[in-house]
Image (tube, rainbow, N blue to C red):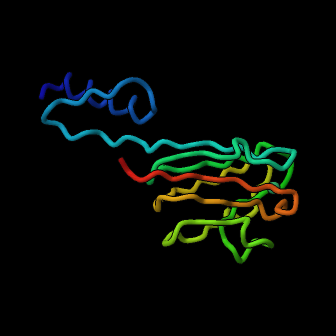
């Protein structure tokens, strides 16, 4: 490979990692790593998850952003729920807990096990602050 071709490939890889442009791969070159898609859910001043339900594929992440002035959290852990039916996860999925999320904080979780997850915000469970993540199996 010429130096120019190598430089062009390097630039393409950098643009790809930055989420810019199409991926061009030479037939004999290994595919550059693509970042897994991230689905964003915001946590609002009126104690809601927006959107309420998201659907992703196994191996993808959901990123919760506290865009409010209020403390929120995210958990699927039944031990942190007042009502156990406010959380759910498929068999084999370990419960998770974000910890306290203040204004501007971000929490990301990668979902590996397909199935339906129901999660809550611990400070606002009584206000009905719950949400759902549907994780589809790999194609
Ligand atoms: Cu909350």
Where residue 104 sits: x, y (%)?
A: 75, 46
- Which quadrant of the figure has residue 119? bottom right
The residue lying furthest to the front in this view is 85
Picture residue at 78% right of the left edge, 71% below the top: 83
Picture residue at 18% right of the left edge, 26% below the top: 3
Picture residue at 65% right of the left edge, 46% below the top: 53
Comparing 105 with 136, the one in front is 136
User: Looking at the picture, does residue 104 appear above or below residue 13?
Assistant: below
- Which quadrant of the figure has residue 51? top right
Residue 89 as seen in the image, left or right of residue 113? right
User: Looking at the picture, does residue 80 appear above or below residue 49?
Assistant: below
Where residue 58 sits: x, y (%)?
A: 45, 53
Picture residue at 51% right of the left edge, 53% below the top: 135
Q: Ligand 1 is located in which of the four quadrants?
A: bottom right
Where residue 82 sits: x, y (%)?
A: 80, 73
The N terminus lies in which quarter of the figure?
top left
Residue 111 as seen in the image, left or right of residue 107? left
Comparing 38 with 125, the one in front is 125
Where residue 126 sits: x, y (%)?
A: 87, 62
Count up the numbered dots.
0
Residue 31 as seen in the image, left or right of residue 70? left
């Amino acid at each position: 490979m010429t130096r120019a071709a190598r430089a062009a490939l390097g630039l393409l890889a950098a643009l790809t990692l930055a989420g810019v442009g199409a991926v061009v791969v030479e037939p004999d070159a290994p595919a550059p790593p693509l970042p897994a898609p991230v689905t964003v859910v915001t946590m609002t001043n009126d104690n809601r998850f927006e959107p309420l339900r998201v659907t992703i594929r196994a191996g993808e992440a959901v990123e919760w952003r506290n865009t409010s002035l209020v403390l929120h959290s995210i958990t699927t852990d039944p031990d942190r729920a007042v009502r156990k039916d406010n959380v759910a996860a498929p068999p084999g999925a370990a419960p998770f807990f974000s910890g306290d999320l203040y204004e501007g904080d971000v929490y990301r979780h990668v979902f590996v096990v397909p199935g339906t997850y129901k999660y809550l915000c611990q400070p606002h469970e009584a206000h009905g602050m719950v949400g759902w993540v549907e994780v589809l199996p790999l194609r």
